[in-house]
Amino acid sequence: MARTRLRGLEIGGIQLGIEVPETFEWEWPESPVSEFQCLPREPEVHIGLRVDTPGNHDLGGERYSVGAWTFEVARHGRDWILGLSKGGCRAQLAHFDREFQTGEIIVAPEMAAKRTYPLRGPIDEWIVLHRTVARGGLFLTGSAMALDGKAIIQLGEPESVGGRRSGKASTSLLGRSSLLLREEREQLRLFRTPWTDSIDPRLSFESRVAELQRTQEFELAFRDQLDPAAAADLLVTHAVVPLCDDALLDRVLLNAQRIAQGTRVVDLGAATATDAPMAWQSTQMQSAFAPPRGGL
């Protein structure tokens, strides 16, 4: 039996243990994912690696374009099959169980010879997405601001300079404004990921969430707290669910309902006095903490 050693990756409190065979001593890429390596003491996800020809057969599932790569997702019975191709040639083929707790990744010899990171996006994103939802969390589109050491989540696609959405192409399947939120120690918390760039740099890798906000333009500033049912509907609207999978969607709905029960979710009216974009500590953002309509 070939000798292997275990290397670890932890994102959002989800630890992945990767079995490294002697035939494939890969290197961490020069990207943010290298900051998330860890000692794999108690892996939640076990991944084996094998150097072999992954083939180019059609998986018969969904296909996503992610930068120069094509990402394929298919279901075979209760298991998941993931493919990653470039220029019509498949570089990786992954098999995972239904819950993404155990899997194997077949790496093409050409890729192994380059010592390429075997969980390159979007494979790592897909695993973390499913394990996050399985553990009661959500990926939501939004941005995070630091306030007194806690995170204020602004739901919706962040605006770039000039109030327009950024036209920069994303190399992330989940999107550069996807936020990982999950309850931990009876508190909703925001976790930094390698793929997100809409988090205030003052926030740590794990931060407590003070509240979630939806901001709309009105003549006068206001603040209304949503009831749990309306809050859950809003969270689902902004949830990142890239594949039409009924089981995953059902879990997202349940997670949104549970999170909405114990977290402040508010509607904000932002005065339309200026068209300038909001800064992290702008006066418009501070209007988020104006008293509710009708007084205290």
Image (cartoon, rainbow, N blue to C red):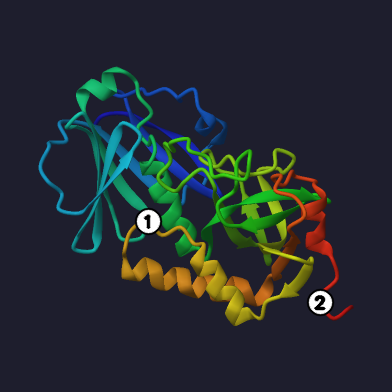
Towards the viewer: 52 or 133: 133
- Answer above or below: position of 283 versus 258: above
Element type where label 2 sits in the image: loop
Nearer to us in this view, 286 or 24: 286
Q: Earlier in the sequence, mark 2 or mark 1?
A: 1
Instruction: Indicate left or right for 20 with 110 as reference.
Output: right
Q: Amino acid at mark 1?
A: Pro
What kind of element bears circle 1? loop
Name the spot of residue 61 as percent of width and height, x first: 20, 54
Q: Which mark is residue 242?
A: 1
Q: Is residue 183 visible?
A: yes
Q: Does 185 sit left or right of 166 as displayed?
A: right
Disc assigned to residue 228? none
Within-10-Å neighbours for mark 2: few <14, some 14–19, many 20+: few
Residue 29, image quadrant: top left
Amino acid type, residue under disc 2 in the picture: Arg
**Percent from the top left, x then y, of residue 213?**
68, 63
- On screen, residue 225 above or below 248: below
Image quarter of residue 68: top left
Look at 24% across and 63% down and name the residue there: 78
> Is 251 or 28 nearer to us in this picture?
251
Residue at 78% over, 61% down: 288
Question: Residue at the location (49% across, 22% down)?
Answer: 30
Q: Looking at the rendering, in which quadrant would you find the C terminus? A: bottom right
Label 1 packing within 10 angstroms: few (<14), some (14-19), many (20+): few
State the quadrant of the N terminus: top left
Residue 32, position in %: x, y? 54, 31
- Per the rendering, the mark at residue 293 is 2
Question: 282 and 234: which one is in front?
Answer: 282
Estimate the spatial distance between the alpha carbons at disc 2 and disc 1, rounded to whole Å. 37 Å
Give the x, y percent position of residue 96: 29, 52
Q: Quadrant of residue 92?
A: top left
